[in-house]
Image (tube, rainbow, N blue to C red):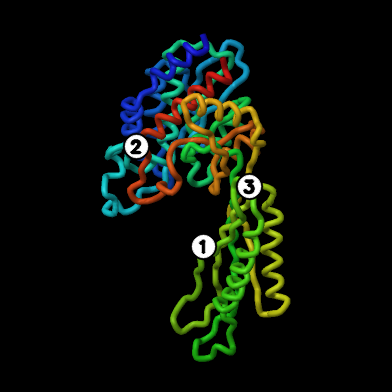
Amino acid sequence: MAGNIKEMVLNRINIDEITSLLRRWVSIPSRNPPGEEKNLALAIAEQLRNWGFEVELHEALPNRPNVIAYIRGEAGKPRLIFNGHIDTVPEGDVSNWTYNPFEGVVVGNRLYGRGAGDQKGGLVAFTIAAKAIKEANVRLKGDLILTYAAGEETNEPGTKSILVDKGVRGDWGIVTEPTSLKIATAESGLAWFEVLIRGKAAHASRPEVGINAISKAAKFIKEIEAYSENIKSRIHKLVGYSKCSVTVIHGGLKENIIPDLCRVVIDRRMIPGETIENCTLEIKEILNSIKSSDPEFNYDLKVMKYSESAEIPIDSKIYKALSESLREIGVEPKPWGTPYTCDVRNFINDAKIPAVTFGPGNIENCHCVDEWIDLNEVLTASKALALTALNLLT
């Protein structure tokens, strides 16, 4: 019987419907910034209602709704949550694109467009999986919940608001960011530090009476580069090594003025086990070490934004269930850790729900000109997600 149910569901998942739906959703811009998710959210909600899903809109961000849909189970437990974000980064200069970023042009197995990989392909994968389960009239033991979140690209609380503020609960979660079909049980953390190096302005013909903030910043940058090399020795088996990069520097007012201010921004990628407190302390130690040997070195340090790393055991039930589902369709599961941050941390850290990141698409093809996704990967992901839901909820 179980085999017959799975066959009925998988037979309803096809590449033509996947392509059609992905083209439709790519054609609806959902740029963030500035936060244009509403039209796509409404289109998703309408489509799901037309298919008979129980649907609600949840607005944590003004005029930027999240979408939540349900296939209710008999007892309401256990519950599996599929998740993805509906916002995309902006497309930039359209003249640089080979294909219109909002047409969903298909060339061979590739569909091109802004958000195709990050991450409307993932949204389509779990949507079509759930639709197939619903159409097959499968009786689930617990709820299958679909969540479409706003605000991920700018670290806004779309997914967190669904799980924590609205209180949508689950026993497991799958976040469908692009992983090239690898299963990520860990993700890097992120911290952005702003350092304002303060000097003293003077006429450039009399540099000796000023304090050059750019020169002082150069000392700091040199130490950060040494620190970056040093922390490469901190290695996580899935995520890789710790990283620290200078990503922004601004200083100087005019050609003939000794600059009194230089702004430096640091991007720090934290592996599981590292914390924002420890990373902040390490940056402070670098700054204070410079100041101890140079009394004219003055600074202000601020944490602009941070997201802690997240991790669940590789032998967790959700990892095992998804791995088994991949094997059922002839794909050998590969464990991974994401070098980027995503909303899986909201499941693991904020809502205490065991979750993995798994989806179609390669992160290297995202946030770039001519973004694309392999439609066969979307098909494979959709089948794996459907089987995972069946394995956990039937």
For this view, does 300 lie left or right of residue 261? Answer: right
Q: In front here: 336 or 366?
A: 336
Three-letter residue code for mark 3: Lys
Is residue 370 visible in the rendered image? The answer is: yes
Residue 271 image position (x, y, % from top left): 63, 50
Residue picked out by circle 1: 247
Image: 9 above or below 216: above
Q: In front here: 359 or 3?
A: 3
Q: Are marks 2 and 1 in contact (CB under 8 Å)?
A: no
Residue picked out by circle 2: 26
Residue 200 image position (x, y, % from top left): 59, 80
Q: Secondary structure at mark 1?
A: strand
For this view, does 206 lie left or right of residue 280? Answer: left
Residue in view at x 43 percent, y 12 percent: 136
Image: 282 above or below 180: below
Residue 175 image position (x, y, % from top left): 53, 34
Residue picked out by circle 3: 237
Q: Secondary structure at mark 2?
A: helix
Mark toward the start of the polypeptide (2 vs 3)? 2
